[in-house]
Image (cartoon, helix red, strand yellow):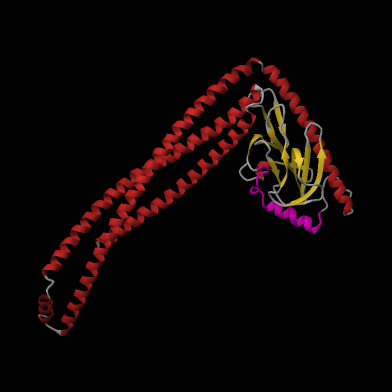
Amino acid sequence: MRYFKISYCILFLFCGLSVLGQTRKELEAKRQEIQQEINNINKVLKSTEAESKSALTEYQDLQKRIQATERLIQVNNQEANLLTREINENANKIDRLRKELEKLKADYAKMIEKSYKSKSDQSRIMFLFSSESFLQAYKRIQYMKQYTSYRKKQGEEVKKQTKKLQELNEILFEQRKDKEQILAENRNTRNDLVKDKKNQQQLLASINQQKSKYAKELNAKQREVNRIEKEIDRIIKESIAKENKKVGSKSKTTFKLTPEAQALANDFQENRGKLPWPVESGVVSMRFGEHPHPIVKTAKIMSNGVRIDTEENGKARAIFEGFVSQISKIPGANLTVMIRHGDYISVYNNIEKVYVKSGDKISRNQEIGEVARNPSSGRTTLFFQLFKNMTKLNPEQWIYKM
């Protein structure tokens, strides 16, 4: 029957919308994630805008925002293109559905007209009395019941398809409105991108004129970083030896674990890739490992952890439950807090005010101190490292979406 055909058409249409809706939902989530990243970058830039920063620092700040903005434009374009396809598909389906509905209404009108002409009780009685047998009369009664039921279903189907057609028109209207909003946002975003790129090119010209000066500056900073990280290694080794002495082990490089510590380490391992950030909001300004400087290619950067720029007075937070194993003062790096999670250690460096003390039991996301402001860069930067015993781990593989 015709109304069954239309029902399948409607079912297919809404299933298609559901699949496309999931894709749009993923794009929207990605768009919001990038926008949050840009907001975090802007917070950092705003907190340091009054500081006298080097051209290198300004260039890197702009580069982070440019890269995030370009990704945002790309996602916006993808979502706009997806909406265009949805709009075209829905418009075509609505047109087909409207034609089907017109045929359904025409058939229903003919059926009503025919029913009206033969609706008198006398016609029905004569139709029954003219039966040649009792069996034929019974079949005619059943036929009249089925015809009445079918007519009722046809009427309900007309109402149902009309309502669905209206709903699809509303969806189409919202899709067009969403597309216009995304395109408007993209125009504004592109304008911001053009301004940032223009400023960046001016900074690059200034940097190129003094490249040797900046190379020396970067090498000096790297030597300072190496000194601090070497001191952190020494402190961790001392901490391992101290803890192992309590349980009768002489090892200075590997924790001797109690059953409780082993269980904690297992829990930590199971949360790999799902651990929270060590600050509430921030931007990674230096990643793990060795890589050439993005501008001064002759300068090599080596980092045994990550640097995260956060907002002024930003708080460092524990990434997992554990115990404070050490709080140390490292010259040139303020305070360092180390939290033990079985045989894993998370290190929070450049803390100005500490809220915990050695031996404290720590819970996940607990604030452990206030991050210090770097006077040379004007940034509030947390130096974060992760170890398993003495082995340095890449925090980006453990922290969620770092």
Identify the residue shown where x is 21% and y is 56%.
103
Quadrant that contains the N terminus: bottom left
Q: Position of residue 77 (x, y in %)?
A: 44, 36
Q: Position of residue 188 (x, y in %)?
A: 46, 31
Q: Position of residue 87 (x, y in %)?
A: 35, 44
Q: Position of residue 325 (x, y in %)?
A: 81, 47
Which of 216/256 is in front?
216
Q: From the viewer's perspective, is 117 left or right of 389?
A: left
Which image quadrant is residue 277 in? top right
Which image quadrant is residue 130 in? bottom left
Q: Is residue 182 above or below residue 262?
A: above
> Is residue 245 a member of the stretch shown in magenta?
no
Which image quadrant is residue 394 in? top right
Say how many tags the image has. 0
Q: Is residue 202 above or below residue 314?
A: above
Q: From the viewer's perspective, is 8 left or right of 181?
A: left
> Is residue 268 a member of the stretch shown in magenta?
yes
Identify the residue shown where x is 78% and y is 38%.
335
Q: From the viewer's perspective, is 179 left or right of 99?
A: right
Which of 101/199 is in front?
199
Q: From the viewer's perspective, is 395 left or right of 343?
A: left
Q: Which residues are magenta?
A: 257-279
Taking the view exactly as shown, the residue that stands out farthest to the top is 209
